[in-house]
Amino acid sequence: MKIHRKLLCSTLLVAAPLVPVNPALAQAADASGLSGMGDGDRIADIVVTARRSAEALQTTPVAVSAFATEILERRQITSVNDLQRVAPGLSAGGTVAQSSQSVYLSIRGQSQSTASQVTDTPVGVYINGIYHARSVAGNAAFVDIGSVEVLRGPQGTLFGRNTTGGALNITTHQPTDRFEGYLKAGYGNYNQKEFEGVANLPFSDQLSSRFVFRYGDRDGYGYNSLMDRKFGAIDHDIYTRASLKWSPDSLPVTLALVGDYAEYRDNGTINVIKALRSDGVIAGIFDAFGIDPESYLAKNNGFYNGFGISKTGNPRVDDPHFESRAGGVSANLDIDLGGAHIKSITGFRASNNNNSMSLDATPFAAFAPVNILPFLAQYSQQQVSEELQISGTSGPVDWVFGGIYFREYGRAITDSYVFSPAITRNANTYSARSVGFFGQGIWHVTDALRLTGGIRYTWDKRFLGRNDYTDLGAGICQSGPDAGATGDCRENLHAKFSYPAWLASIDYEISDGIFTYLKTSGASLSGGFNVFTTPPGFENFGPEHVKDVELGFKADFLDHKVRTNIAAFYTQRKGAQNPVNTYNPVNNTLTEYVTNAGTVLAKGIEFEGTVLPWHGMELTTALSYLHSRYKKGSFLIPGLGGIFDRSGEKVQRAPKWTANVGGTQTFDLAFGKAAVHLDYAYVSSQIFYQNTPDPTDPTQIPADFAIQNSLGRISGYGILNGRVTVNLDNPNVEIAVWAQNLANKHYYRGMYNAYVALGETIYSPGTPRLYGATISYRW
């Protein structure tokens, strides 16, 4: 069923969280925003909702980074994945098979194990209080965003399971009682175009509305000579949102309704061959065509010139693309009872996505009907959620209790043509139900000393209907009880999980502007199923359980001209969910599955700083260090000759360093203001693939695994961005010139590593230098 029909038919359902706000904090937020320079000579007070109520960032005992509209625009943070450039300890990237719209985040070395539609991420994404369960098409555009908070470390007590690494708490602007808005248009290289508009329309001082629209497109920056086609193009990127807010004077009630819809299409991911093994399957096919691999790669495999091509006869597969339609509607009700607040957050979301590409990046289909790894993946998902909270104050204790119900349904179909014109189909239906109850209290022992304790318990129920077969003449089943035979091929899998989350902390305000805290917490990443063909016994995987200890220090110095926030942590991940990517020569299929690896021990430190050295100048920096490793003897898996140990492997997606630095100089002009901004963001090398050969299996050659593991590491990179703006007082116009990746740095964002299985490793390059200009008019 089409998404827009669902949106029109649904009447109740996801909205902006309306948290009870301390009036003094609300006044500070209105005066200076959530982040920025404040009045130009004093760092602004920042208000966050990291603990589900509004409180000052500098006295919140959580490692959290907060960014408001001004900061997001200044640093060109236009989507979820861009947050890598501003938040310490956060990185984005994944496999070459994922789309540009997928969210594949890592915080403190905890990342989603695969991009599977039923695999959960340890970094929960909440937009207007609603949990977005699926990473596919989750790279939400930041249009008319009020604030973004990046919470680091387990957040299971208040945000639920699947926040073991952290959470993104994103809120959009709510309707106001003023007639206001803006129009913006922009143009850039690669024929990039963007149009954006916001209109806030009050009907009265009690009822108001807000409407948002954005459109963008762009030509490609990579070239496929065999298809005579540019890759990396965005065909269209459309986003709309409508909000309604009702706050009657006669009732202590606030009701917010929100509906949004997004539609996106690009023309495929650029993938390039990074390495070929001389005796591998792919090199053998080069030889069969009489093509010298080295000379061909040197001529045709430029950084942005991937040449994957397929000719399956299915036009949807042979036309590389990613397209998505997603949206939702919501209702948020807040009732002020005087001594307590009751809040209901109800939401419905749905999405349809499909993605096709030739994963192998080889040219063979141009010469003969030899298709190596082309595929078409189609996903659909629907979710409904309800969260009910009651919060208040009893004497020296602030408290909140609540419960949540979450339900989702989905379907996923992947058609692949592995070394064959015949389809291998992986078709799944899945559902999940989660019920949780939570409570947390803050005891104000004195004006400066507080104790916090919280607990949540969650029950999950999951189902997967797995149906894998190939149409090689008779529809041979690839998994389940009928594997190797013809028949229905369907395998129904059921699982139940339950787990607690907890938190205990003590914090102390040493003096005005100097604050410290110590906390410990635990949470779980949900268990689940593997959707693709797996070895017997690996059909499902268990939860990953995380515990941490965190020590934090936050301080403002020199009359609020210098701010430093520091967090040090130690984390234990038990039963770490680890991806396995391989090719199964027995049934001629690619497979990817998750298994519970060993115990991962991680420790690190994060620093954020802001300095106002002189009037109009703001300098910001963030730095994180992470040391992550498997506990010796904990990562044990079955091999040919019995159990063998893989604990010596590097932990995947756990960069040792992330850093960013930025500077903004603002100038007062006779007719307005001008600002010059530069920022630089760096992430160190990351392991995307690691494996250990079975010492008892003579077919697994350690030298080949060593090369494969070296190719599984993507080098670190840094990106330089800049923006110059001129704001006119009358008319209220802003002219901006911007650039991303100013130095045109070549870097990679993902990989597919099949060096041992197929003799090939594929990398996906990041975007080149982009630049352009925008003009905005506000009223």
Image (cartoon, rainbow, N blue to C red):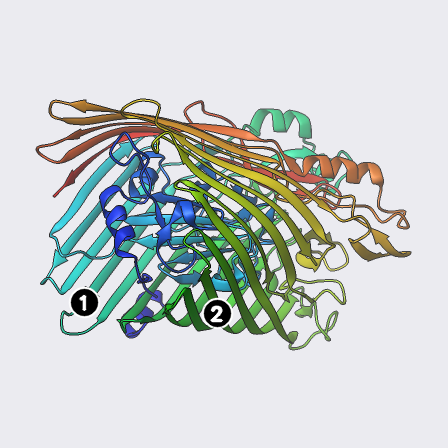
Tell me the CA gap for discs 2 and 1. Answer: 28 Å
> Neighbour class for label 2 at 10 Å: few (<14), some, many (≥20)?
many
Judging from the image, what secondary structure is the residue with disc 2 in? strand
Q: Residue at x 39, y 51 (%)?
A: 140
Residue located beneath label 2 in the image: 439
Q: Amino acid at mark 1?
A: Ser
Q: Residue at x 66, y 46 (%)?
A: 602
Judging from the image, what secondary structure is the residue with disc 1 in? loop
Q: Is residue 257 above or below residue 177?
A: below
Return the residue nearer the eye: 660 or 648. Answer: 660
**Front label number (2 vs 1):** 2
Return the residue nearer the eye: 622 or 439. Answer: 439
Q: How many marks?
A: 2
> Can residue 383 be spotted in the picture?
no
Q: Position of residue 263 (x, y in %)?
A: 34, 54
Residue 247: image tag: 1
Return the residue nearer the eye: 568 or 404. Answer: 568
Q: Position of residue 125 (x, y in %)?
A: 45, 56
